[in-house]
Image (cartoon, grey):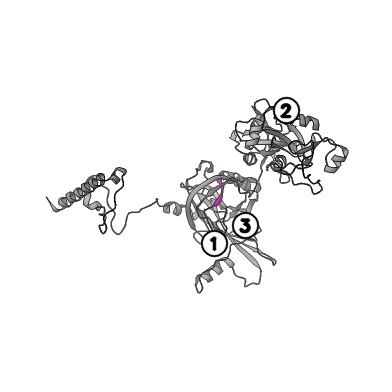
Amino acid sequence: MSLPNARLASSLAGAALALLAVGAGPAGAQGVIAPPSEGQPIAPQPPTAATIDPAAPGVPAQPGSAQPRMIGPASVADLADRLLGAVVNISTSQKVEGGPPRDATPPLTAPDGSPLQDFFNDLLNGKEGDGENRVQSLGSGFVLDPSGIVVTNNHVIADADEITVNFADGRQLDATVVGVDPKTDLAVLKVESPTPLAAVRFGNSDAVRIGDWVMAIGNPFGLGGSVTVGIVSARGRNIQAGPYDNFIQTDAAINRGNSGGPLFDMYGNVIGINTAIISPTGGSIGIGFAIPALLAQNVVDQLREYGETRRGWLGIRLQEVTDEIAEGLGLPNARGALVMGIIPEGPADNGQIEIGDVVTRFDGREIATSRDLPRIVAETEIGKTVTLDILRKERLDAPAKPVSVQVTLGRLEDADETDAGEDDTPADADAAAPDAPAAPAPNATLGLQLSDASDELKKRFDLADDFTGVLVTEVAPNSAAGEKGIEPGTVIKEIGQEAVKDAADAREKLTKLKADGRRNALLLLADRAGDLRFTVVPID
């Protein structure tokens, strides 16, 4: 036996003995290897060269000692190298007249005596040798078209007097504003370059899944060309930044200065525009938000073509479909957008849509919540005739039936955004409203004191002369109705989707609901401004 073969046989024999020892003890039945006795090391794994013939067919070449084999996730260096040239740093300058400057990049500090402090000061604070009080801020962006179209956030360039786009190769080009959209926080810039620029393109953000790898490239704290990698943490986030919130959440490190920079998928497509972070420290804690590419692309296209946005308009007021409302309306689930008002002479004011309808699909797209409908309508072409699939419940004891209607969209003007929000919160109580009594009145129902409207009550609660319904004059403290936001001055229009004529009719309907064993009463309410909302109140 040759020496190499002897070593191989010895190794195999040792392995066999080890397996036998494991199987002999009780721990071996559970696949647990007992620890060695004190001072006895665990035998190391034999090197590959001692167990495999490198010259055998099909055996891959082993890396040399000067180039160890890479261990861990696959490198994204090739992808980053391909994309870095299209990502730009954006610096702006603004003249200010005293007072604190607008939110700019915060100062960086280095350890005492470090030469980096001078670098940070020059980088972020700028020079003030001319005596002018100027504020400089930094952000990110990306080239969308080789001709010089650059996309960034509106808040990066807002109120700027000068905008400079800095490229990875060291070039600096002055930029002009093509158009901005504060509602989505997007801006389109134009630079003039003698040669075509490296550019990237938008991808399909709807195809991105939670857990997909993404890459952010930007200019955090002025450190241009910074690459970070993470995953998509969530989709459809509403952070109350605007009427069309639908953010992608990522744990890729995003800091101040990353705003306006691209969020790439692993194919190199822009699937989001980094816009905001949640952070108590001002730095990344792994919760960043990006505008989805499909929303951004529609806005960018309009800004490039018109210099402004032209959004579709449906002309309805909406309310969220909660679990309670879905149960009260007899809906299969708490999905869709509940119609609570129709704007007079608006596109939806054609007699086909009714208050209480639940929009489940718009132009073939699913409507999951009341926040989805305004955004999808705004993305749709003005003048387009679209089909709305709705669920309509005509009576309390009748099932909701599907109905399809058609509406030709108008244009949402800046001064009329009545269908851009949700009417799901009660109005603030009027300062002149009477205080609630210490206990329910003798004929109170659901903790409410109901009354027909007299001239004195109309004046007291500032109601219209053509008022219809039943007036709530008092609300018992700690009652279910009070917890639902019902206040004195509220008008009950319907109970269980049946119109109420007077206070006696309202009490009769509530008594019947209780006698029928119903646990909740579905009320259609109007506030003092006339805006409607559904509320579900537990029956005592």
Q: Residue shown at 27%/54% (left/top)? A: 36
**Amino acid residing under circle 3:** Ile
**Amino acid residing under circle 1:** Phe
Cβ–Cβ below 8 Å for labels 2 and 1? no
Q: Nearer the viewer, residue 26 or 75?
A: 26
Percent x, y for residue 523?
Answer: 72, 34
Dot 2 or dot 1: first in sequence order is 1
**406 in relation to 373, above or below:** above
Mark 2 lies on a secondary structure that is: helix
Residue lying at the far bottom in this picture: please name it: 113
Q: Which residues are magenta?
A: 285-293
Label annotation for residue 43: none
Q: Would residue 514 be found to the left or right of residue 236 on screen?
A: right
Mark 1 lies on a secondary structure that is: helix
Percent x, y for residue 157?
Answer: 62, 57
Percent x, y for residue 257?
Answer: 56, 58
Dot 3 or dot 2: first in sequence order is 3
The residue beneath circle 1 is 221
Residue lying at the far top in this picture: please name it: 398
The residue beneath circle 3 is 157
Per the model, the C-alpha gap separating discs 2 and 1 is 66 Å
Marks 3 and 1: which is nearer the front?
1
Q: Nearer the viewer, residue 158 or 427?
A: 427
56 within the magenta span: no
Cβ–Cβ below 8 Å for labels 3 and 1? no
Percent x, y for residue 38?
Answer: 27, 58
**Amino acid residing under circle 2:** Lys
Q: Quadrant of residue 362?
A: top right
